[in-house]
Amino acid sequence: MKKIINILLYGSIIALIIYVYNLDFLIFRDLKINYQWLSISVLLLFTGFIFSALSWKIALKLHNIPVKTGEALFSQGIVTFTKYIPGRVWTILGRAALLKNENRELKRLSFISLKEQLVYLCLGFFISIYPVLKTDKLNEYAWIFFLLTVLLFSLLFSSSLQRLFEKLWNRLFKNQIDLPKINIKEFTQLSGIIIIWWFFWIAGFYFLLISITGIVPLYYSFAFPLSIVLGLISIIFPGGIGVREGAISLFLISNGISADVAVTISILARIWFLAGEFFAFFLALYFRKKT
């Protein structure tokens, strides 16, 4: 277990250093920020990260695997930066591996982790339909998000579609895959906490926006979940680098914000979220000593 933790720690730190090194901080040279709104934004962001760990804890509890809040914060936060490592394997498997013991089978923990992430992704796609529909220059693409949302929900609930997907996957990649099964009760209970998690992040992004641009329509804040889900499905881009920034920029430009301001906001949004990831990571280091 100690070896796994060290791999996660050092791999995450290396990936993070590479990412930060490539950031262009000169773009913020002439930026004027309202730090009062920014402080509220960061507080909401941090709260969202705490709820993401509570979501993981509830997912485990639903499967009769009780864990302490500290354990959930540790296992969730310590793998925060592994998303910057290509493949995203550790994002799902890492927290499961950290909670494995003689009473907790790794395969079962991994299935629960994947299940919770699929619910998170499903809700993210569902939420993202709204901003795309609301934007005149993008609403013709809303059907894509609607279709992906329906497909993801179907993969969670339809046994026949799951078997078909597993068969196609096994045939194409010559590798066995078993999709986690979920029932309505599990989905409802998980959705409740995940929606709260999304709410804090969306609200935080809204205050980030107005700290830079002043008051803007509330639906602009939904550019953030849109960028997150697009980043999640872009597996070849670690941490959704480039994809998330591009999605935010395109959305804001389509809603009348100038290109240079939109690009600045997209990069600042990454740094803002990185601050939240640092918070989750150091919180995990604190609880590492407690667990």
Image: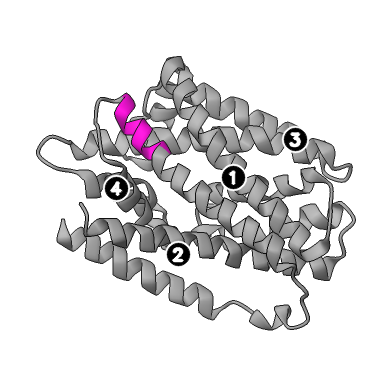
Circle 2 Cα neighbour tier, 10 Å, few/some/many (<14 / 14–19 / ≥20): some
- At x 45%, y 47%, the residue is 50
Tag 2–tag 1 contact (CB < 8 Å): no
Residue lying farthest to the front in this orientation: 36
- At x 45%, y 28%, the residue is 190
Q: Which amino acid lies under the numbered mark 3 shown in the image of this protein?
A: Tyr
Q: Secondary structure at mark 3?
A: helix
Q: Could you tell which of marks 4 and 2 lies nearer the N-terminus?
A: 4
Q: Quadrant of residue 38?
A: bottom right
Q: Determine if residue 257 is in view.
A: yes
Q: Mark 4 against mark 3, which lies toward the viewer?
A: 4
Instruction: Judge from the rendering whether residue 257 lies leftward or rightward of residue 161; answer left or right.
Output: right
Q: Give the magenta range.
A: 55-62
Q: CA distance from mark 2 to mark 1?
A: 17 Å
The residue indicated by pointer 4 is 70
The residue indicated by pointer 1 is 200
**Percent x, y for residue 212?**
77, 65
The residue indicated by pointer 3 is 130
Q: Which amino acid lies under the numbered mark 4 shown in the image of this protein?
A: Gly
Does 220 appear above or below 123? below
Q: Mark 2 against mark 3, which lies toward the viewer?
A: 2
The residue indicated by pointer 2 is 278
- At x 59%, y 59%, the residue is 42
**Percent x, y for residue 69?**
31, 42
Q: Which amino acid lies under the numbered mark 1 shown in the image of this protein?
A: Phe
Q: CA distance from mark 4 to mark 3?
A: 35 Å
Q: Secondary structure at mark 4?
A: helix
Does 228 appear above or below 13? above
Q: Could you tell which of marks 4 and 1 lies nearer the N-terminus?
A: 4
Q: Which amino acid lies under the numbered mark 2 shown in the image of this protein?
A: Phe
Q: Secondary structure at mark 2?
A: helix
